[in-house]
Image (cartoon, rainbow, N blue to C red):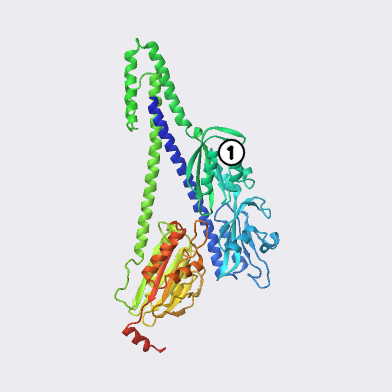
Amino acid sequence: MGLTLRRVYDSAVFTLQDQHLREINLLATGLNYELSSLSDTVDDTSRFLGLKPTLDTEAIFNLLKDTLRRDPLIYGAGVAFEPFAYRNDLRLFAPYVYDKDMKRLDLSTVQGDYTSGRVQWYQQARTSGHASWSEPYIDNGNGNMPIVTYAVPIRSGATVIGVATFDLRLDLLNQRLSERMNPSRFMIMSPTGRFISHYDPAMVLNSGLAEMTAALVNPSFQQITSHIMNGDTGMGVVNDLYLNGNIVPGNLWISYTPITTTGWRLATIASEQDLIAPIRAQIQIALLGLSLTIMLTFVLVWSMASRLTRPIKKLEAAVSEVARGKLDTHIENIRSTDELGRLSLGFNRMLKNLKKQIELQSQQETAQKLVERELQMARETQKSLLPTDFPPFPDRKEFELHALNQAAHHVAGDFFDFFLVNPKTLVFVIADVSGKGMSAALVMAVTRTIVRDLAQSGRTPGEILQETNERLRDSQKGGAFVTIFLGSYNISSGKIIYANGGHVPPYLITKSGGVSNVGDATGTIVGMLEQQEYRNAELTLKPGETLLLYTDGFPEARSSAGEFYGMPRIKTFLQKHAQDNCLELCEAAIREITNYQSHNLADDVTLLALKRLNAGPVSLLSELLSPKN
């Protein structure tokens, strides 16, 4: 019985460890998703202000208010412009909205010249040229509270004209984690090891993991902290750890996992004794009952032999069933009230509780598999909306076309499309919906349907984007927006009439290997502002030239160190693959960006390559007879 209970105990400990690590991973995933969603909002604000740097002051404050309403953890949101970047007569301008009362001020009147290098978040974003999270600090200017700041540079073309930010309240984050993790001790560290959140609020800003490790002088704990700072996921066990001035007896489970969006590390310290106390109590009751039974058996062996034998055999049979893995075993007809009866009842209760725990875990795994299956079906449905047959027009020898869509999640907000509106004209489009997940996928499907419907009517790309903008505003109420590049390609002449609604400009690859940006924006993003006009522009593909369209998941891909892939790397990559056909170019680009992000895409990546082939006799005749010639 003792050996069997030991096996049950070991199995229960293993199950609890696995369940505890799952809970930590779920918490980190939730924080990661929440912080990613908040940072995406500021990224969108940065891109929008890059396209509309002269937006009026009230509109900027309204954008910041929208950011502040997203989550109670956000204390304030702001924008800080470079000197004279907002107005020629205004050197510094930094609108900021904070507190639940939506107070507003100009940070330049509080912090002075934030461009001098004293303001860490501003200097870091402007110098690095990409989004970053600051180290924790005390906001002495407004709320006098611990915060971290997320800052992303605002670009107008290739020029940084300012920084967009939001401030995250660490006191509310600490309070939220305290409520969820009790009785476990929790810690969140910055990439340098400073405490962003801690079960002891006094440690936030005042200490870090390095100081804690040095103070404890525990080799096992030092090894675990090394894994934590490396960004690993796992669990370790430490014995008799000296913590908060006292030795905590027994085993401590230290679980850890990274929060990838911010580069932070989450760790928890939980007492094994506290977590398994209910199981230990049941085992102690069973062992106590067994001990009393043995004592009474020796005293009353002759007079109580027949009475004691039957319950013992039942219990023995039940234990044997459990040892063979049958956890639905139940001891029936317990009539005695002596030690064996209480032992049997305790054994039944123990197995019942253990079975409930296993059933609960099984239900959770089943529910998770169901959600994953439904998301996979949604992804397959979404992929069916995109063209899948390549080459799409095998009988057309005048051009070559290929496209790929790689989703960061099960479903994506990016899409591409192309179709012939007549034998001489190919319409192609690439777009990126704001946000991620199912909502972005729904907006993607609606946008694709609208564009395809309008293109068949014979309208120009600018007219199509103007009408799409109005329809999306009517259907989405301004809740999402799309960047779109839409082109109409004359197959004979190679001329492309296009309209660019806030999308990243494509690259033109010449036959000799030259690479340059073309197709700048001819209008703002689609689906946000009413009554927008979109100009038509033109460019011409010469035989052997390739036009590569892509979404921002390509240049904004991040390495494990947080470094953006960036435009210079794209240009170098395209020069290396300038002689590839469209299929080879797209597949090489997907491999390149996937390897750069260690096979963990942070954003959707979509590519569309169009190459004009050497003109045949018919095409050359059409070109010679064109009005231009």
Relative height, residue 574 to residue 226 (above, below): below
- Give the image quarter of residue 98: bottom right
Q: In this orientation, does residue 208 appear?
A: yes
Question: Which residue is nearer to you in this view: 115 or 542?
Answer: 542
Q: Which residue is mark 1?
A: 217
x and y, in percent, of residue 585 in the image: 39, 69
> What residue lies at 46% left-to-right and 28% top-to-bottom?
281
The image quadrant where one finds the C terminus is: bottom left
Left or right of 84 in this view: 350: left
x and y, in percent, of residue 385 in the image: 35, 64
Q: Residues within 10 Å of mark 1 (few under 14, many from 20)?
A: few
x and y, in percent, of residue 325 in the image: 33, 33
Q: Farthest residue to the top: give it.
A: 303
**Dot 1 amino acid type:** Val
The image quadrant where one finds the N terminus is: top left
- Give the image quarter of residue 459: bottom left
Left or right of 293 in this view: 262: right
- Give the image quarter of residue 449: bottom left
Question: Which residue is nearer to you in this view: 148 or 529?
Answer: 148
Q: In this orientation, does residue 443 appear?
A: no
> Quick one: SS at disc 1?
loop
Relative height, residue 588 to residue 349 (above, below): below
x and y, in percent, of residue 183 in the image: 53, 37
